[in-house]
């Protein structure tokens, strides 16, 4: 059954049809939430809440990209949760250094980690650095990077998703990438002196 | 030749260039700039590397499905949303009435009102002080019988238990001076026997307390107003209780509506 038919049936209250849409989009929705939060539990909660909200408001869907409409719901849900977290900050279980990074050099932390092959460790370390740099971005910049660079949205889809003009998407994305470049430069230099993103930033 | 630093506008152009979002005209212009400006070329390469690092992040596998069940999408009860404003309003009204009744039942206000409303008391306030003092009853006096042994802690003797058979007629104090009760210390010790059913501590059986039925109209008025005051005193307590209980209920439904 095609997507448009499933949407129409969902708008008539057929939960089974909506669940077909859930199965189609749950991976992209979850990964978007995961990259916004940087950890699984809140991403799972946000994904579930986003699908519930989407079903309850599906009658408000008036055509266009369903994926963009769905991701708009999940990004708004994530924004709500992030605002709630800022009001009630929590302390992470992992050791954290004064700069807010996980202190993986802490003996206590190393004691609990299982041995990993060097390449896999490097890859994992690089992934952690990139994710930390994404996390360090302001919320509205982070969402644009996730949508465009990770979910392969074009600018028009991203603009629909965040509900902002195309020009805003362009400028936010450029500023977000610039911040990411500076963040990656400094952190890569720290773990591997001499390794930089090709050139000095101006 | 020193190369110019990359401007914010150029960073934005480079970012859009990487995503293929530039118009043909802008793309051609930037292409020519890139050929002549090595700093701009390095900036593009840096941005490209940043973008590829972000894109290299793997997709996270799902730990479970997020399909919905009927219970997940069942309409929630609207009770918390309706009951919260209801209990809030009740609490506010009860609190307002509490403060109003607290004001009107306060002793200062009640006494002022009673004084203004009672004609007898008005007369008493306006009458000369002599007439008021004349109406005062003589103070009740206890006779211990023995001079200098009336205080507590002394040794008890048979003489101390003796009391006069009749209350001596004590003259009223002069009108001009403040009445001071005088202890009849100079009275002769009574000669009543120790045994028998005599008066205890000098109180005569022939001077009974006035029965409730025999209370004067003035006394009844006083008691009645005191009873009313006591009754009115419980009203603020009830209102305060209602205000607190409603506030707690409103808080409960407010919390419930947010979950």
Image (spheres, coloured by chain):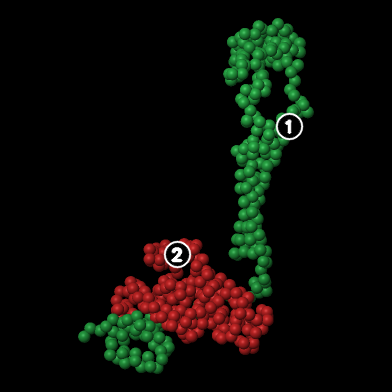
Chain colours: A red, B green
CA–CA distance in space, label 1 to label 2: 79 Å
From the viewer's perspective, is A100 left or right of B211? left
Decide which of B148, A147 is in the foreground and name it: B148
Asked whether residue B56 appears in the rendered view, the answer is: no
Instruction: State yes or no: discs 1 and 2 in contact (Cβ < 8 Å).
Output: no
Q: Chain of mark 1?
A: B
Give the position of the C terminus of chain B as an image quadrant. bottom right
Q: Position of residue B112 (x, y in %)?
A: 62, 38
Q: Could you tell me which residue is drawn at 75 percent across and 24 percent down? A: B210
From the viewer's perspective, is B164 left or right of A98? right
Residue labelled with disc 2: A94
Location of residue B207 (image quadrant): top right
Q: Residue furthest left?
A: B1
* Marker disc for residue B220: 1
Q: Residue furthest right?
A: B213
Asked whether residue A82 appears in the rendered view, the answer is: yes
Decide which of A70, B140 is in the foreground and name it: B140
Image vertical order of residue B92 relative to residue A113, above or below: above
Q: Which structural element holds mark 1?
A: helix
């Amino acid at each position: 059954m095609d997507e448009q038919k499933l949407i129409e049936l969902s708008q008539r209250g057929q939960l089974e049809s909506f669940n077909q849409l859930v199965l189609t989009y749950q991976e992209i929705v979850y990964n978007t939430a995961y990259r916004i939060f940087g950890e699984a539990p809140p991403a799972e909660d946000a994904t579930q809440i986003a699908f519930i909200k989407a079903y309850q408001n599906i009658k408000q869907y008036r055509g266009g990209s369903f994926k963009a409409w769905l991701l708009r719901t999940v990004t708004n849900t994530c924004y709500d949760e992030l605002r709630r977290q800022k009001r009630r900050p929590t302390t992470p279980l992992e050791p954290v250094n004064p700069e807010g990074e996980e202190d993986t050099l802490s003996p206590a932390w190393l004691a609990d980690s299982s041995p990993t092959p060097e390449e896999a460790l490097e890859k994992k370390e690089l992934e952690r650095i990139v994710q930390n740099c994404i996390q360090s971005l302001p919320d509205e910049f982070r969402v644009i990077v996730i949508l465009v660079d990770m979910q392969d949205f074009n600018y028009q889809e991203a603009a629909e998703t965040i509900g902002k003009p195309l020009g805003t998407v362009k400028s936010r994305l450029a500023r977000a990438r610039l911040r990411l470049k500076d963040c990656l430069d400094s952190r890569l230099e720290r773990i591997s002196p001499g390794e930089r993103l090709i050139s000095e930033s101006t | 030749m020193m190369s110019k630093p990359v401007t914010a506008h150029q960073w934005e152009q480079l970012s859009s260039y990487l995503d293929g979002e530039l118009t043909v005209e802008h793309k051609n212009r930037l292409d020519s700039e890139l050929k002549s400006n090595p700093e701009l070329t390095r900036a593009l390469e840096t941005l490209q590397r940043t973008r590829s690092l972000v894109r290299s992040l793997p997709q996270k596998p799902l730990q479970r499905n997020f399909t919905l069940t009927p219970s997940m999408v069942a309409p929630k009860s609207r009770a918390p949303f309706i009951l919260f404003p209801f209990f809030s309003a009740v609490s506010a009204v009860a609190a307002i009435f509490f403060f109003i009744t607290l004001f009107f039942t306060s002793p200062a206000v009640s006494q002022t009102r009673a004084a203004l409303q009672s004609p007898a008391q008005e007369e008493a306030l306006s009458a000369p002080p002599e007439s008021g003092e004349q109406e005062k009853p003589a103070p009740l006096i206890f006779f211990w019988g023995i001079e200098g042994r009336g205080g507590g802690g002394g040794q008890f003797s048979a003489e101390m238990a003796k009391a006069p058979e009749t209350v001596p007629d004590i003259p009223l104090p002069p009108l001009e001076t403040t009445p001071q009760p005088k202890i009849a210390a100079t009275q002769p010790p009574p000669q009543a026997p120790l045994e028998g059913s005599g008066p205890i501590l000098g109180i005569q059986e022939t001077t009974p307390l006035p029965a409730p039925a025999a209370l004067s109209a003035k006394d009844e008025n006083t008691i009645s107003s005191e009873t009313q005051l006591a009754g009115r005193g419980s009203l603020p307590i009830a209102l305060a209780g209602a205000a607190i209980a409603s506030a707690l209920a409103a808080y409960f439904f407010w919390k419930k509506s947010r979950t």
